[in-house]
Image: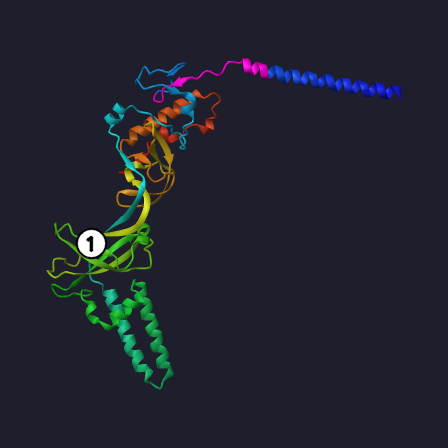
Amino acid sequence: MKIKKIFFLGSAFFLIGVSAVYFKRINSGEAAAEKRPPQKTLYQCPMHPQIIRDRPGQCPICGMDLRPMDKIKEKTDGVLGRAPVALSPQRLQLIGVTYGKAKIRSLTRRIQAPGRIAYDPQLYEALEEYRQALKALNSAQGSPQGSDLSWARSMKKATILKLKLLGLSPAQVSAWAKDPSLDQGLLLGKRGQAVWVYADIYEYDLPFVRPGMSLQVKSETLPGKSWMTKVLSIDPVINPKTRTARLRARLDDVLGLLKPGTYVDVAIDSPLGNHLSVPESAVLDTGDRQYVFIVKEDGTLKPQAVELGNKAEGYDEILSGLNPGETVSTSANFLIDAESQFQSAIESFAKPGQDSKNAAPSDSMGSMPGMKM
C-alpha cells in the first residue's frame, strides 16, 4: 500500500510540474508576441515592381504614387502569365487607350457568302417528275389494277424525297405543284423574268440561316445596284469537300441586269437576340483562351478570362467572366498585354521558390496574341 501511495503521489507531482512548464512557455510566447514590433509596411510602384520603399512616396521613374505591397498582391489577374497593369493618365493617352462597356445588346450576325446566278435544270426536272407522279396517281386511283396504284404511290414518295433533298419543304413542294409559273428562270427564260441565286453557306453559319430570311444580293459588275429577296431553301446535305450547303433564292430581275453565270455577293443579317456583349476589339485571343482588360476603380487594368458565345456584327457575346456595367479597354490592347506579361515575369522572378511549372506560357516569348479587328 505504501508503495502504491508513493507511486500516485509521484505521478501527481510530475503532472503538476509538466503543466506548469507548459503554461509558462505559452505565457512567455504571448509576451514575446506582444513585445515583437509590428511588421513594417513596404510600398511598391504598381508600374515598376522593382521600386520598393519603406515609406510612402513617388516612383522615381514614372512619378506614380507608391502603394502598399499587400494591397497590390491582393489583385490577382485570373490569367496565367498576365498581371494587372497600372499606367499613368499621360501614358494611357499617349498609346491611345479607349474604353467600352459590357452590357446587354441586341446582337445581329452578318453572314456573307459568294453566290452566282444560274439555271437549275435539276430542280426543274425534279418538279416535272413530281407533277407527272401526281397525274399518274390520279389516273391509277380509277384503275381496277391495284399494282398501278401501288406503283403511282411509290413514284410520288420518291419524287417528294428528291425535292426534299434539294432543300424544298413539304409546303413548298405542294405550292410548286399547283403553280408552274414558279418555274421561271429554272431553264433559259426571257428577259425580265425571275432568276435564281445560289450561295454556298459554310457549316458554322448554317445554324443561323433559315428559309424566309431576308437576303441581299450585290454584284461587282453592277456597282450601286442591290436586290432584296428571301431565302427559299437550303440543301440539307453538306458538301464534304467544301463543308458548305447550297442556299437557293428566287429573285425578280425586271430589267434583266443579272445574267446566268454572274457572280454575286450574298449577305444575310441573322438576329441573335439580347445578350451580354463587349466590342470585339476588347477581346484578346491566344487560341486556347480569351481575355479582356477590365478597368478598375483606381485605374488599374486587370486581365480577366472570359468565355465567348456567338460572334455578332462588331461584338462578342460574353457567357461568363464579366458583369453588366464593367468597363474594358477596347484599343491599344497589344501594348497593354505586353506590359502585363512584363510585370508578370518580374513578379515571378521576385517570388522566392517559384515553381517553374507556374511560369508564364511560351506565347509570351513567341507569337503575341492577336487582338480581333
Q: Please, what secondary structure does the residue beneath circle 1 have?
A: strand
The residue pinned by badge 1 equals: 216
**Left or right of 7 in this view: 90:** left
Residue occupying the far bottom of the picture: 144
Q: Is residue 273 above or below residue 165?
A: above
The residue under label 1 is which amino acid type?
Gln
> What residue appears at the point 33 percent right and 82 percent down from the top-left corner?
141
Q: Give the residue drawn at x 64%, y 16%.
A: 25
Q: Is residue 67 visible?
A: yes
Residue 101: image quadrant is top left
Q: Using the image, determine if residue 256 lies above or below residue 147.
A: above
In the image, residue 33 above or below residue 283: above
| Picture coordinates of residue 71, whole percent (x, y) | 41, 24
Kindly indicate the quadrant of the structure image that contains residue 194: bottom left
Q: Quadrant of residue 134?
A: bottom left
| Magenta part of the chain | 30-47
Q: Nearer the viewer, residue 275 or 126?
A: 275
Quarter of the figure that contains the C terminus: top left
Q: Where residue 191 sits: x, y (%)?
A: 11, 63
Determine if the magenta segment contains residue 32: yes
Q: Is residue 31 magenta?
A: yes
Q: Position of residue 325 (x, y in %)?
A: 32, 38
- Which residue is nearer to you in this view: 311 or 364? 311
Look at 29% across and 75% down and name the residue there.
133
Q: Inspect this view and state whether residue 241 appears.
A: no
